[in-house]
Image: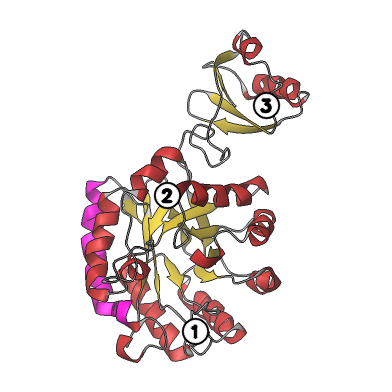
Amino acid sequence: MIVAMKEGTSRSEAEQFAETLKKEGVAVHFSEGASRIVLGLVGDTSAVNGENLKAHHLVEKVIRVQEPYKRANRLFHPADTSVEIRTAGGTARIGGGTLGIIAGPCSVESREQIVDVARAVKKAGAAFLRGGAFKPRTSPYSFQGLGCGGLDLLLEVKKETGLPVVTELMGIHQLELFADVDVIQVGARNMQNFTLLRELGRCGKPVLLKRGLASTLTELLMAAEYIMAGGNDRIILCERGIRSFDNYTRNVLDISAIPALKRQSHLPVIVDPSHATGLSWMVPAMAKAAVAAGADGIIVEVHNNPEAALCDGEQSLTPGAFSLLMDALRKYADIEGKRVS
């Protein structure tokens, strides 16, 4: 249930009103806009008398939310959410009018490789460094990442370049190892690992949540809701392609998911054109399409020697190709009225 307070209602008045609502056994979420305060009631609201609320002198209107996701719902939080990371050089941001660019190799393979790629993507304008230390692979015989050693290399490069690190968490048992990681990535296969999502709701770190291979948008938002229900609203939604009958591309990039998600939710939405297509020559076109459709950023794979990559070389851009893409994305971002971070 959404309770929109009348324009001019003070924070203290809204808080006093919220205390009366809590007596009905519901939790109250505050969203404070430029001109009014919106209260989101979470829990069993069946006993809350909406007509009585409408009659209150501070209440503008009351709306019952039909969707199962509440905190992730734009009705609860009308303004766009941005996720910010403090860095040595300032603030890296995704959402809220900023196009956040995350770039780096699929997996960390060596110190030379990750240092070379990190320097290149930073020079080109990326604000975040991606790289897998622990890799979920379909085959148990494929390269699974360097593990803790790869994580150490990412954090070492973070100190050198100042780029915040985005890397994937495979399970709860690894959470302590991610204390210095800036953004925890939840991969498509773990999108509905509800035990993991609940734990991430308590950790307070930003979470990049990828859409499952065959998941609906409602299921993606419900996964975000699991994290937000634990108190963590620093979530970035990621469209990374879904399965279809056609195998020409690795997956099918659902561009329509971008405006749909942004209509339903206040959370920032980014796109992974690398995993969506699986083909490096398609990545620039899909990245541009994503920005044109309103995406708040992209996460793209860059490798200094794709032909020799131990993981996903076919879909990885070279540093030179990534630099050209960044030049194009700045123009697209300018048209959309966004700044590049």
Q: 337 or 74: which is nearer to us? A: 74
The N terminus: image quadrant: top right
- The picture quadrant where one finds residue 54 is top right
The C terminus: image quadrant: bottom left
Against 14, residue 183 (above or below) is below
Say what secondary structure mark 1 lies in: loop
**Which residue has dot 3 on it?**
45
Q: Which residues are magenta?
A: 314-336
In the image, 83: left or right of 286?
A: right
Question: Label 1 near label 2: C-beta < 8 Å?
Answer: no
- The picture quadrant where one finds residue 244 is bottom left
The amino acid pointed to by label 1 is Ser
Say what secondary structure mark 3 lies in: loop
Which badge, 3 or 2, is on the more N-terminal residue? 3
Q: Is residue 239 visible?
A: yes
Q: Nearer the viewer, mark 1 or mark 3?
A: 1
Say what secondary structure mark 2 lies in: loop
How crowded pointer 2 is (Cα within 10 Å; few <14, some 14-19, many 20+) is rated as many
**Which residue has dot 1 on it?**
139
Mark-to-mark CA distance, 2 and 1 = 35 Å
- Magenta stretch: helix, strand or loop mostly: helix
Q: Nearer the viewer, mark 3 or mark 2?
A: 3
